Image (cartoon, grey):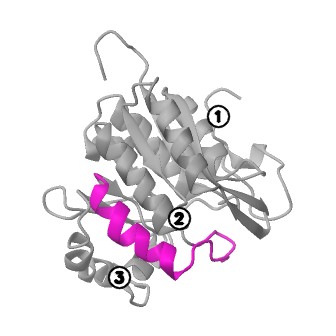
């Protein structure tokens, strides 16, 4: 971030969620809540709500390229969060745009499976994320099913199995990995930070709520916003997790949909 600009600019490259709890909409809310100015490039339109995904409509790659070029020609972006990417051509377009105008931080949330269990990306898209975008990222934030898909193995079910994944996750080429342990059957939600010194656990409580829609999108966006403001990676992760825990705790104040509702992104204000 330059010294003459107090508020950093951050970019989300992801799919759209009409219900507002995940994807681009959640990212922009999170950026705002964490004190960053949000910009966006949409990679796909989805027909979804709090109960599931009914359809995915990819944005033509030429228009994704035009969105990126038009934005980056004008706006100095301090950090980027990448979410849903459905094809190799789109992944390569994103890589080329960001390599030519490299921001300080690139965070990749490898969105492949919705909270509802709906698969959002096919095998070719998974390979593109793994081979094209993961090596570009300073941090990737997979949950356990997503990490398993990236490695072609079964999802871990214990802390020991999470630790056993660390060598293979490291070889994927990202600067660091935050392996999210929310899928464990555990009283807490332990995440494992890999590739930033010795692997270490980032502990967090398990919040008793069904409002889990978009938690992965929101966490990665919160980390991105804090990195853009100068936090170290461990500090950004800790602050983002604390914010998300409060957003989950206060999610009961919202009445959105009849399935898995969203977190309360603006719990500090209303």
Residue designated by label 1: 266
Local secondary structure at mark 3: helix
For the point 42% across and 66% down, which residue is it?
Answer: 142
Where, quadrant-wise, is the C terminus in this rendering? top right
- CB atoms at circles 1 and 3 under 8 Å apart? no
What whole-number distance in Å separates the C-alpha atoms at marks 2 and 3?
A: 15 Å
Q: Is residue 122 magenta?
A: yes
Local secondary structure at mark 1: loop
Q: Is residue 265 magenta?
A: no
Question: Residue 262, position in %: x, y?
Answer: 70, 52
Apparent side of residue 36 relative to residue 6 in the rendered image (left or right): right
Question: Residue 121, position in %: x, y?
Answer: 57, 73
Q: Is residue 251 above or below residue 87?
A: above
What crowding class fits label 1: few (fewer than 14 Cα within 10 Å), some (14-19), or many (20 or more)? some
Q: Is residue 168 above or below residue 222?
A: below
The image quadrant of residue 2 is top left
Mark found first going from the N terminus, 1 or 2: 2
The image quadrant of residue 134 is bottom left
Magenta stretch, residue numbers: 113-138
Q: Nearer the viewer, residue 44 or 27?
A: 44
What whole-number distance in Å separates the C-alpha atoms at marks 1 and 2?
A: 23 Å
Residue 230 makes an appearance in the image: yes
- CB atoms at circles 1 and 2 under 8 Å apart? no
Q: Nearer the viewer, residue 21 or 239?
A: 21
Mark found first going from the N terminus, 2 or 3: 2
Residue designated by label 3: 151
Residue designated by label 2: 111
Local secondary structure at mark 2: loop
For the point 73% across and 47% down, which residue is it?
Answer: 20
Residue furthest out toward the top: 4
Q: Nearer the viewer, residue 25 or 245?
A: 25
């Amino acid at each position: 971030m330059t010294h003459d600009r107090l508020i950093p600019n951050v970019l989300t490259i992801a799919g759209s969620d009409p219900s507002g709890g995940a994807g681009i909409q959640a990212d922009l809310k999170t950026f705002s809540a964490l004190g960053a100015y949000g910009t966006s490039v949409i990679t796909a339109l989805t027909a979804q709500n709090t109960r599931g995904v009914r359809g995915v409509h990819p944005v033509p790659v030429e228009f994704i390229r035009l969105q990126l070029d038009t934005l980056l020609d004008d706006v100095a972006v301090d950090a980027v969060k990448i979410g849903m990417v459905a094809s190799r051509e789109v992944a390569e377009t994103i890589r080329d745009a960001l390599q030519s105008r490299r921001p300080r931080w690139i965070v990749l949330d490898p969105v492949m499976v919705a909270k509802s269990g709906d698969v959002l990306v096919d095998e070719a898209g998974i390979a593109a994320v793994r081979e094209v975008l993961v090596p570009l990222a300073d941090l990737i934030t997979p949950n356990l099913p997503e990490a398993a898909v990236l490695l072609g193995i079964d999802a871990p079910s214990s802390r020991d199995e999470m630790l056993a994944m660390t060598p293979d996750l490291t070889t994927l080429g990202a600067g660091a990995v935050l392996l999210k342990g929310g899928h464990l059957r555990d009283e807490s939600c332990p995440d494992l930070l890999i590739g930033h010194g010795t692997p270490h656990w980032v502990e967090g409580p398990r919040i008793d709520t069904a409002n889990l829609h978009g938690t992965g999108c929101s966490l990665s966006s919160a980390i991105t916003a804090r990195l853009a403001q100068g936090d170290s990676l461990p500090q950004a992760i800790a602050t983002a997790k604390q914010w998300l825990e409060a957003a989950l705790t206060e999610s009961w104040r919202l009445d959105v949909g009849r399935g898995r509702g969203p977190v309360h992104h603006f719990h500090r204000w209303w």
